[in-house]
Image (spheres, rainbow, N blue to C red):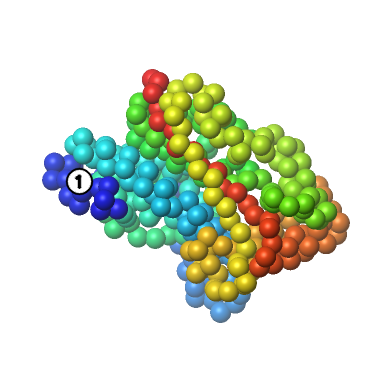
């Protein structure tokens, strides 16, 4: 980071020092802290919620590993340009989930005021804000956003597409909140899995079910593969959109623990199993039969966990600069 951001800007104001500002947000945080306290003090098996939160954290680590160093360098360079102009930067993390990205950015960028927003805090993992420059807010992103126009210098959106039917509308509302010259970052996972070789019947069935379930919710599953075209169609961003495609695979040879493999951009078989179980639950809620899907899920799990499997999941990232009003 030192190559992109000088260590000290004496002319910049101090941080806003706000954390969970509204009574609603503070009540939400108390509930999250109580859940964490119970899970840590209990000798029972970790709850499904805590397991899901842990899996999301590990996925974030894996995604960051395969997107870096480019991902972090682009963010650092953009924020450094704002700070060198003599002011603090404003950053918005939309659908912050566990809060990991927002917390890490706030702790490594003392002159960035970071706001993380979400509508469901089930997966949130509390952590310390060392500079007092971090705030979390509960916001329904499907409605009008409570931010001033042209307010943020950087807006980060990650893995919202599979759960948000109004994705295109949200991006348009976020664009209005972005300053001219500000950066919009979209990071989305491929829907399902892909391979350069013929895929097994179970893998094809699993992919088809996921895409049909998304279509049933009004979500365009193909949008992730064309983030550049999608951003260009908004009409307010530079045509020079930087884009990056990375690949997530299973563990090579099954070596290493869950976290060390995630840091290497690979998924441990145990993490693959958790991800597929969550997908199965979503598909059953959509209307598929559990009994019919279970054999396909197990076949997909074995295939993804095989050390020499050609199957992977692609991660697409796009970095766009706003040029319009």
Q: On the picture, is 272 further left or further right than 124?
A: right
Near-viewer residue (281 or 271): 271
Question: Could you tell me residue 243's position as x and y percent?
Answer: 49, 39
- Identify the residue shown where x is 38% and y is 38%: 154
Position of residue 38 relative to residue 175, above or below, is below
Residue placed furthest toward the front: 197
Which residue occupies 55% across, 55% down?
A: 122
Identify the residue shown where x is 26% and y is 51%. 3
> Is disc 1 placed on a helix, strand or loop?
loop
Q: Residues within 10 Å of mark 1 (few under 14, many from 20)?
A: some
Quadrant containing the C terminus is top left
Q: Is residue 71 left or right of residue 172?
A: left
Compare residues 2 and 294 and report the one nearer the observer.
2
Determine whether, in the image, residue 207 is placed left or right of residue 251. right
Q: Is residue 39 above or below residue 199?
A: below
Q: Is residue 22 visible?
A: no
Residue 259 rendering spot, x and y as whole percentages: 51, 68
Q: Position of residue 98 (x, y in %)?
A: 49, 55
**Quarter of the figure with residue 55:** bottom right
| Quarter residue 29 falls in | bottom left
Which residue carries the number 1 mark? Answer: 14
Q: Residue furthest bottom?
A: 43
Picture quadrant where residue 147 is located: top left
Horizontal and vertical percent position of residue 75: 37, 44
Q: Is residue 230 left or right of residue 91?
A: right
Which residue is pictured at 66% across the width and 45% down the height? 191
């Amino acid at each position: 980071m030192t190559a992109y951001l000088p260590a000290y800007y004496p002319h910049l104001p101090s941080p806003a020092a706000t954390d969970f500002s509204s009574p609603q947000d503070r009540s939400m945080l108390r509930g999250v802290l109580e859940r964490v306290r119970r899970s840590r003090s209990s000798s029972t098996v970790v709850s499904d919620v805590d397991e899901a939160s842990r899996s999301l954290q590990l996925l974030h680590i894996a995604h960051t590993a395969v997107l870096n160093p480019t991902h972090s360098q682009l963010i650092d360079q953009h924020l450094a340009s704002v700070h060198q102009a003599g002011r603090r930067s404003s950053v918005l993390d939309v659908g912050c989930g566990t809060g990991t990205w927002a917390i890490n950015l706030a702790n490594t960028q003392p002159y960035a005021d970071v706001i993380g927003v979400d509508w469901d805090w089930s997966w949130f993992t509390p952590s310390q804000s060392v500079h007092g420059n971090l705030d979390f807010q509960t916001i329904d992103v499907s409605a009008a956003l409570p931010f001033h126009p042209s307010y943020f210098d950087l807006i980060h959106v990650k893995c919202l597409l599979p759960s948000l039917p109004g994705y295109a509308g949200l991006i348009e509302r976020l664009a209005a909140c972005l300053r001219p010259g500000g950066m919009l970052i979209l990071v989305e996972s491929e829907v399902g899995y892909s391979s350069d070789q013929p895929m097994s019947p179970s893998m094809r069935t699993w992919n088809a079910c996921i895409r049909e379930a998304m279509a049933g919710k009004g979500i365009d599953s193909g949008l992730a593969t064309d983030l550049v075209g999608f951003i260009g169609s908004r009409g307010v961003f530079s045509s020079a959109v930087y884009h990056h495609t990375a690949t997530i695979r299973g563990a090579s040879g099954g070596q290493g623990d869950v976290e060390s493999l995630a840091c290497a951009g690979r998924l441990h078989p145990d993490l693959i199993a958790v991800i597929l179980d969550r997908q199965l639950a979503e598909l059953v809620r959509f209307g598929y039969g559990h009994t019919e899907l279970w054999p396909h899920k197990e076949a997909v799990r074995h295939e993804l966990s095989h050390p020499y499997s050609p199957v992977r999941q692609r991660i697409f990232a796009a970095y766009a600069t706003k040029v319009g009003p």
